[in-house]
Amino acid sequence: MYNDTIAAIATPLGEGGIGIVRLSGPDALKIGDQVFRAKQNKKLKNLPTYTLAYGKIIDRDQKVVDEVIAAVMLKPKSYTGEDVVELQCHGGIVVIQKILDLVLSYGARLAEPGEFTKRAFLNGRIDLSQAEAVIDVIRSKTELSLDLAVQQLEGSLSNRIQEMREKLYDIIVRIEASIDFPEDDIPDVEYSEMKEILADIHQDITRLLATADSGKVLREGLKTVITGKPNVGKSSLLNRLLNENRALVTDIPGTTRDVIEEVLNLQGIPLRLLDTAGIRESDDLVEQMGVERAIQLIDEADLVLHVLDASSELTEDDFSLLEKTAKKQRVLIVNKIDLPEKWSIDVLPQDAKIVKTSLVRDSLDPVIDTIIGLIKSGYVQQKQEGAIITRSRHKQLLSLALADLEQAQETLSNNLPVDLIAIGLQGALEHLGEITGETVRDNMIDRIFEQFCIGK
Amino acid sequence: MSSNYQVIVVGAGHAGCEAALAAARLGCKTLIITMNLDTIAQLSCNPAIGGPAAKSHLVREIDALGGEMGKVIDQSFLNIRMLNLSRGPAVHALRAQADKRKYTAIMSLTLQSQENLHVRQGTVTELVVEDGQVRGVKLKSGVIIPGERVILATGTFLGGMIVIGDARYPGGREGEPSADQLSRNLSDLGFKLSRFQTATPPRVHADSVDYTKLTEQPGSERPIRFSFDSPLNQREQMPCWYTRTTDETIRVVRENLEHSPIKTGAVSGKGPRFCPSIDRKVLRFPDKLDHQIFLEPEGEYTKEIYCLGLTTAMPEHLQKLVVRSIPGLENAQIMRVGYAVEYDFIIPSQVKPTLESKLISGLFSAGQINGTSGYEEAAAQGIIAGINAAHSILGREPVIISRAQGYIGVLIDDLVTKGTDEPYRMTTSRAEYRLLLRQDNADLRLRPLGYKIGLIDQKRYQKVVDKENKIKETLAWLESVQVSPTKEVREKLISLGSGDLKKAVTLHEILQRPELSFADLAHFTTLPDLEPQIIEQVEIECKFKGYIERQVRQVEEFNRLEAIKIPQDFDYEKVTGLRLEAREKLQTIKPTSLGQAARIQGVSPGDIGVLMVLLKGENKDVSA
């Protein structure tokens, strides 16, 4: 049904001891055999369906990346209904990422969010109701990845992509204007000039690609900060969310000194949870550092879960913190309603998302529903740089842009007509645009009119 | 007079003529009504067909489908040239200067001679509509003409308003009345209308022009034609002329900008950016010191000369100053002054890809009424509206040309999917698969469809089939013949300005060398005797193979989404996974396929993901 092979990291990031890179599509076995060397020299393509093989992942320099177990599931009886290969490695974000990059370099395409499930459905492996359950995931992840595309690229990276696009755009607009308006006096783009400009852009992309390999790997997810005065129940919230005891829970203020980070899969939406030290004016130097850090984290957060204690009077600390979190997309969690309430939620901002609960007694569902609701409303957006999926995506798009550009350069050096040069340039522009989330075609005509005096 | 027609076409401009001919030729009893029988297929602005690349592509596509425009211009041109020859095969652009009276006369006679087609004069004031279904039209005289389908092709006449300087008066074209009642009737029927404007330059008397100061632009020496069926004989041509504006032109315009309608606000509708007035050019590009002007004859039986580049609706005395500031026009006599015309159009999101109205069943619209500009764009919609009106009567499947099949598809899809905020003109940069949508292969692309529809006869269809076979055969032959690097071959290649040959290759590989032509291959083998059109295709297919294959792959990708159809009664309100903006846009536009949905602005890839899963589910339910 599909003629390309997709790949992605199939296990949640930041969890567990095993990481899985999954390949699905007609070339899954072929690509698998290019990266995997079985202990007994068996080829994956010769294995029966639902078989495991033990071996190593070898990179292009014949170096061992990791020891893995490869699982082969042949069509039609695999999850997606296509040939599937899963490479189960020892986890470790860097290793998984390397294996993914390696299979992509052999011709797999990075899967879109939810694409395995989509293929499973389209190939009739799961029914509509099952598929509908993943719609929300497809939805939120795709939206997020688009937002990511735009927002992650703050700073120098984004600027550099923009610069390249501008250079490309400029030259394409000149070509298109000359093609579409042959009767207007629009000068032809000289090939010698074009050659220089393209060489320049080529260098830009090559340099940027080189940094993609050495760039640091960050975890994926919306940066979510749990904040609140000491002892209001932040760690209880974190623990309930994670369902494990990573942060200490005590009644002594200030025991959660440093920032704890966990990744959580909340109905398919990855959250990076940060629990901050309790914020209040403090003389304790160590705690003071923690507090500054916490305020800084609120500034950087995509989403703030602000915990308040219903059983003790609100103080200056609470109000000043409420001011700090007001600028953020936040959920105000009013905890300890199992104890006598000392204040009414009427004092809180009217438009805030508020959940009243007892984190030691009540179900967490209302809290989770409110968080999910806020995220799906589209207001929560990820600001932070370099999530893994997107990074691979960027790298792949940059490589595609480079290939297109090289095609244009070849066309140019063969002295072929501009129309053909434009094909490669358009491709490069579109691939770069996919990184920043911009489309080209609709704006092209506007650009032509801005730059040239067209018209009879 | 009031017999029952199957199709009634309102308006006999370029859209109306193609629509009426298509419907009549498909066997429908058809009536075409025009306000004036003497202005059928009038070239109201520049008497030229083609020109900018994509326009000539449209004409050839219309011809491939069995339309008339290409044939008429081939019989009536004064001057024909191929532009853009150096810029690549996909963007070659044919341009012909028409004898405007001859063009009108030939098209008019074609209509009058067409079986099943009645041509009559009259002014339509109202549509007859019952239960959301069109039943006919009502004329100014009160006469009602029943009809099962109505195609509106009213051009600039709906609520037309002419502007010259400070003067403003109703009119659809200078000297002709506007159609105000019909415009009001459409509003009453619930159509959302908006206003555009367009303008035309002054015409001067040929004998008042000093040709010694102009550069001559002769026609093409090689015989070329728009239609794939026109004979390629040599014909005498009239030259066009070229000059430029002067400092004085710029000065006059600049000093009098306050009298320009763009400053006085006399014109309210948005005009086409690619046809700016000289006033606007001076205003927008103050650094450009001169602008090119083409002086073009309007016909054998008129002395009128069209001043291309001098579009303006400034007051008459200023037009005279502007004209006379130009070399060659110092003593020019203005015969018609330039003017702007403002008119109503139907916001095209109310139109289906078949060009049938979403509001009133059986009502179609084509041409400027849908927000486009240009004769070719109008004619392209006309033939599609005519075909689909006929098909809906005959109970046949509607014809929708995809973006990957032709510029006609790009045009209509853009209109109904994205709408337009200025009079829409086709350009090649609007097409995603430009290299495939060439004007030279429009017959290969669309004649089979024209044949299937029934507008192309067996004989003309067979010609295309033969051509296609011959191309394939020749390409296969090129792949099969080996050339060895003998001393003679190597020397010959170098003498032809090409590179050396190291190992044996096929003729196909030799032809792929950019500097070599098909004729050059005669040095290495005996060439079959082929028509120039075959050689042209073989050269393009061979030389640009990689590029063409790349676009073919992109089209396959494109077709995958196009193939997922969305039922017209699909309820987007129920799909909670869609964002609000997307839901509203989808509900308004009601795309016919997932591919079209993806092109709607405000619909994200995430929304498409959601729809894809749901639609696959529906399609499965249907087939189960």
Image (spheres, coloured by chain):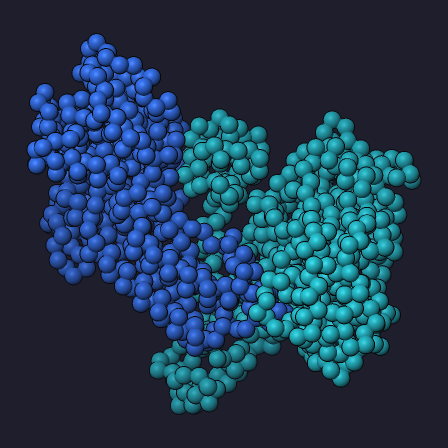
Chain colours: A blue, B cyan
Q: Nearer the viewer, residue B478 or B12?
A: B12
Q: Residue at image x 74%, y 26%?
A: B131
Q: Residue at image x 88%, y 45%?
A: B122
Q: Quadrant of residue B110?
A: bottom right
Q: Residue at image x 10%, y 24%?
A: A253
In x, y percent, where is residue A229? 18, 26
Q: Quadrant of residue B124?
A: top right
Left/right placement of residue B616 relative to residue A342 reads: right
In x, y percent, where is residue A435? 36, 51
Q: Nearer the viewer, residue B538 or A121?
A: A121
Q: Residue at image x 40%, y 49%?
A: A437
In x, y percent, where is residue A297? 22, 38
Q: Nearer the viewer, residue B198 or A171?
A: B198
In x, y percent, where is residue B263? 68, 55
Q: Is residue B606 above or below residue A443?
A: above
Inspect this view and state whether residue A362 appears. Answer: no
Left/right placement of residue B144 relative to residue A218 reads: right
Q: Is residue B398 above or below residue A374?
A: below
Q: Specify the quadrant that holds the N terminus of chain B.
A: top right
Q: Is residue B435 above or below residue A97?
A: below
Left/right placement of residue B72 relative to residue A154 reads: right
* Badge count: 0
Inspect this view and state whether residue B400 appears. Answer: yes
